[in-house]
Amino acid sequence: MKKDWNKEQFGFETRAIHAGQAPDPTTGAIMTPLYLSSTYVQESPGVHKGYEYSRTGNPTRRAYEDCLANLESGKFGFAFTSGCAASTTALHLLKAGDHVIACDDMYGGSFRLMDKVIRHNGIEFTFVDLTNVENFKKAIKPNTKMVWIESPTNPTMKLVDIRRTCEAARPKGIISVVDNTFMSPYFQRPLELGADLVLHSTTKYINGHSDIVGGALITSNEEIAKKIAFLSNSMGGISSAFDAWVSMRSLKTLALRMRQHETSAMEIAKFLDQHPKVERVAYPGLPSHPQHALAKEQMHGFGGMITFYIKGGMDAARTFLESVQVFALAESLGGVESLIEHPAIMTHASVPPENRKALGIDDAMVRLSVGVENLEDLLRDLTQALDKV
């Protein structure tokens, strides 16, 4: 019998290890088994033990989904093959003729999905600077059915006031979706701030070891949950049992990892902020961040992502990126290893150049995903790379 691991009685770290899981009733195994079966025997037509086909439901995936939902203060969780698969499923809550207001600054893959794929299904998108809730209110149309929020945004690290935006959306029946990939449920829980639906690329901090690709949706709204369950089963973008098992294992150390990511990121942000070869740093934990007060209000920490602008443009950035030794030049983020990348060329190349220019995604921008290596090693690596510029 599974316990009710509610947050009123148990802390985040305890729930990350136990929520949604129970010892195997057959063997007593403390770890949830990896159920690789595609189908399940029925006692009589339609009479089964809760599972019939693994696209519809799988015991390993369900344990992972329940744990992740618990950590996000949600009731229903859904695991997908990728963050893009989760986003695609969420956008299929809409129909032709509906309108979406989305962040003007977001992950390049999300923009590509909306602008180059879903738009052709007859859904309209308006990309708006959502750092000001008045911009959201002005963009609302009679057919607006969804607002798509990233906070912090990728890659410029702007913040959206999640509570006020959701409060403005709810009376008009607008579904609020928050991509919480950068923060993880340890540092930010959008459902507690009034969001209807939370999205994760679980490839990133949730799994945290750069060895699977996955996505997730979490909600407490039963009507939305029923629709997502139908869409997930019909469209088939569900997580494999193995990826769910790996990610559930990773959730057990999420709190430990996130604390170290943030501790090191804060020190690195301070270091870069004072470095003569750095133009400016965007990190919500720095008092210099224009929305530092909002960060303290709606987040429980500042995370491990840093964006900064190096003096000297593309030539300086290229030299710097080619010179790091501990940081790995690679796309993605949120792993235990520190990654560094150039958004204009790498993660946001799918965003039109004029859009990138307007958002400040220029040749001088560098994005760091600070890992959990020794802090002194990371600082020394950044120092020697900057010295070469």
Image: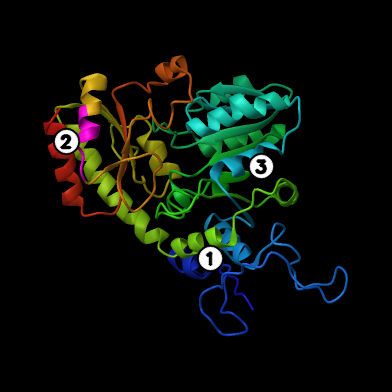
Dots 3 and 2: beta carbons under 8 Å?
no
Q: Which residue is mark 2?
A: 385
Dividing the picture into quadrants, the one containing residue 118 is top right
Q: Main secondary structure of the magenta part?
A: helix
Label ID, residue 8: 1
The number of numbered discs placed on residues in the rendered structure image is: 3
- Write the residue at 57% across / 46% down: 198
Highlighted magenta segment, given as a residue range: 319-325
Can residue 341 be seen by looking at this rendering? yes
Q: Nearer the viewer, mark 1 or mark 3?
A: 3
Between 104 and 319, the one nearer to me in the picture:
319
Q: Is residue 249 left or right of residue 241?
A: left
- Look at 24% across and 27% down and name the residue there: 318
Task: Classify 10 Å Cα crowding around label 1: few (below 14), some (14-19), many (20 and above).
Answer: few
The residue carrying mark 3 is 89
Q: CA distance from mark 3 to mark 2?
A: 42 Å
